[in-house]
Amino acid sequence: MRGRLALVASLLIVACALFVAACGSDDSSGGSGDESGSTKGTKAVDPAAIDSAKGNITYCAGKDTSGDLKEGVANFNKEFGPDLKVTLKEFPESADEQRNQFIQRQRAESGECDGFEADVIWTVEFAGQKWLLDVSKYVDERKGEFIPSTLESVKFDGKSWGVPRVTDTGFLYYRTDVIKQEPTTWQEAYKLAQDANPKGIVYQGAAYEGLTVDFLELAFANGGKVLSDDGKKSEINSPENVKALQFMVDGINDGAAPKAVTTYMEEPARRTFEAGKAAVMRNWPYCYALGQQAKAIKGKFKAIPLPEFEGGGKAGILGGHNMVISAFSKNPEAALKFIDYMTSAKTIQLNAAKYTKAPPLNATYEDAAVKKAIPFSAQLKEGVEQAKSRPVSPVYPLVSEAIYKNVNAALSGGMSPEEAIKKADEDINKALQTF
């Protein structure tokens, strides 16, 4: 778990970013949408200008371990070169390092990265610092193509700040050889896991972003909230959220989940399930193909959308990446042209069929090649449709830290669920005061 020093460091990062934003230009030319919020004065890209776009741009992203970005760049350059050319600049695999690389450049008002592959949880944070260009007009023209939930992650202050390229949502995996009925509620899933052999449910319970996601899936399904509708104060201290956390704590105390789950991230949870040491797992869609290669569970498990919370409803948390344009790009029109190509029906279909990337476009799920490559595509679409964005705030990293460190403390027995939620409430309100 991160300690006091990490929280102070995070606060300093936000404070420095605010100083840069405050000293930046407030030229309102080209702006669009509601100009009353914290993004007043930001510029917009005119989608009509992309047809005549020319020149070179650099697109920055984390290390492309799948190869889909590299192929997309090569195909774009082949189709539009030599008048248009994109260079892909790769950052380290670590998400934190990728975020830091982008922040460093934006603080320096560097135009090195014309566009950037932003995690869905960074988009609003960057927009709040006036580091991104407004692409509302472009998104509005295409919004009918996208699954509505995916567009929620690009919205802030009445505008759109990016275009979804890849989406994601959590899944529940269960062993069909030891569990004979599909769980319809979280409570049933835990009970079935507790009674099975092998027994247990594994998930992401370590003190990091993954635990924030796992907790919010239960809290939101139970009707809980994190922030007020205007994003200015915490509303996490509620009976709904306490009940969701109590359920998780009871799961560990009752033996439905192993105590070791408080140290698990995605990969330890996956390896435990693949080794045949757990009956149920909460994880991401990427685990499906890997599970079918694991000797202990191959052909013996099923992936389903997250179930209901008894007495509540269903909720998933949206993952994925958005393509954004730097406010300091010297060629934003070409950057939008590249985004248009990479989020086109043709490219998204290729990414899904060849690289099993979860598509943000509705129509892609009907493609025969995609259905073959992703056998659970119908369930995946259902999961994405029911997914919600994480709390929308420019200081989201601090909000998330307040959640995962206190939830982990409760799961580890360091404090009661009531104490953990109350402390999270205090920490979130402190974080909100920094912006």
Image (cartoon, grey):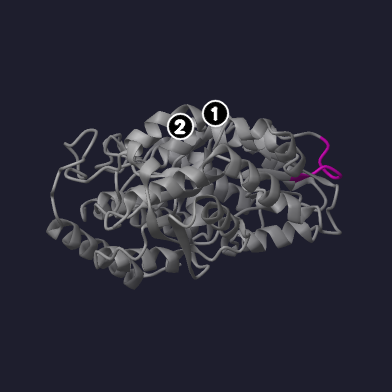
Residue 394 visible from this viewpoint? no
- From the image, give the main secondary structure of the stretch colored magenta: loop
Residue type at mark 1? Gly
Q: Residue at x 71, y 45 (%)?
A: 173
Q: Quadrant of residue 273?
A: bottom right
Q: Is residue 399 left or right of residue 93?
A: left
Residue 107, disc = none
Marks 2 and 1 close (CB-CB < 8 Å):
yes
Q: Is residue 90 magenta?
A: no
Residue type at mark 2? Gly
Q: Is residue 303 above or below residue 378?
A: below
Residue 370, image x, y percentages: 70, 39
For the residue labelled by badge 1, is the local secondary structure a helix, a strand or a loop? Answer: loop
Report which residue position mark 2 lands on.
Answer: 223
Q: Is residue 309 above or below residue 276?
A: above
For the residue labelled by badge 2, is the local secondary structure a helix, a strand or a loop? Answer: loop
Report which residue position mark 1 lands on.
Answer: 313
Magenta-colored span:
174-180
